Amino acid sequence: MSIGSKDRHGPDQARIAATEGLGMRTTELPLVVVLGEQEPPLLDRIKDRARLRRVGEPHLADALRAADALLVWDFLTDALPAAWPEEGGPRWVHTASAGVDKLLFPALLRSDAVITNSRGVFEEPIAEYVAGLVLAMAKDLPGTLDRQRSRTWQHRATERVAGTRAVVVGGGPIGRAVARVLGALGLRVTLVSRRARPHDAEFGRVHGFGELPGLLPEADWLVSAAPLTDETADLFDATLFARMKRGARFVNVGRGPLVVEDDLVAALHEGRLAGAALDVLRQEPLPADSPLWSVPGLLISPHMSADTHGWLEDLAELFLANFACWAAGRPLRNVVDKTLGYVPVGEAPGGTPHTEEGSS
Ligand code: GLV
């Protein structure tokens, strides 16, 4: 899935302007458009190898017409479909995210632009965050904070997580990192992926999406770490929550639209679920007047599970490493399969082949 052809994807072609009459050739540097309100760190390292133009959404369409490459720094933008040019446009699009759902619109899918993502930056931080949520719920940390605020000394017994069962949906590197960390806490983890894998080197058997309903009655924890695609949109709905054990809990660190939020709230209200945590929501930022903020048993965080100190530098370093490949006509890292909507099997960060099932 990597790019081997400098001619098709490299920056040099058509960027060499010959000034014939003067007997002089000038080489124009490739134009890299950076979409985002914030300035990414470290990019001045390539200022003598690229013309960098940072734009916000209002100037995106103009900028894209001339761009050779696009860095989607503001990866939650909805502006790209309307701004994508009818003809031409960037030949390489890199996103500072694992999820590429905002890039899966028809014009970009049809174009021969290559999409790469930031796989490799987020896996372990997200896994730690999920472990934090699981422990917070099992140990009732929210209840302890409430009591501290009201200066109430009320002893309670809490739950052990070791020996409980978790189903993790998402068989890519994020889901796998989550499964690994939960496993280290003693949970018995079952991994569910787009395609079943009967002999996974690390997890033994990986189940397919179709097996998910059958796994839920045994699960104490259901963790969503899947990419958002046509296949996964609205996956976690009333039908699945109804299959869950009474008192189980749910965590979503994938994308908001994986979950039918009204169905989740109903499952919490009726006690089918004892708790849930959403780090991603259908509407982001969640408006202050959303009823979700005050649903009992629901922990909400603002799409931050992956973001640990230094993450922006890590994202920039990954982009710069890929830029070096692109500029040299070498294979890019983390090439997204446009038909699947994620970096597929065999693409490891850095391009080292391995045997992992794909996901975001
Ligand atoms: C964050 O949500 C990402 O996709 O990287």
Image (spheres, grey):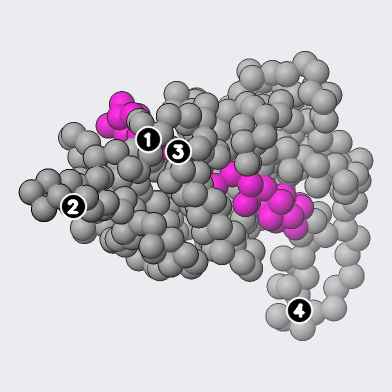
Which comes before the other along the chain, label 4 or label 1? Answer: 1
Sequence-wise, the earlier of marks 4 and 2 is: 2
Residues at marks 4 and 1 touching, judged by CB atoms closer than 8 Å: no
Foreground mark, 4 or 1?
1
Q: Marks 3/4: CA distance?
A: 59 Å
**Dot placed on the residue nearer the N-terminal end, 1 or 2:** 1
Q: Mark 3 or mark 1, which is nearer to you?
A: 3
Decide which of tag 3 and tag 1 comes sooner along the chain: 1
Mark 4: amino acid: Gln
Q: Which numbered disc, 3 or 4, marks the residue closer to the eye?
A: 3
Pointers 3 and 4 in contact (CB under 8 A)?
no
Q: Is residue 93 above or below residue 107?
A: below
- The span picked out in magenta is 106-134
Q: Mark 1 is on which residue type?
A: His
- Can residue 350 be seen here? The reply is yes
| Residue plotted at (83% across, 30% down) | 202
Contact (Cβ within 8 Å) of mark 3 with mark 1:
yes
Q: Which residue is mark 3?
A: 329
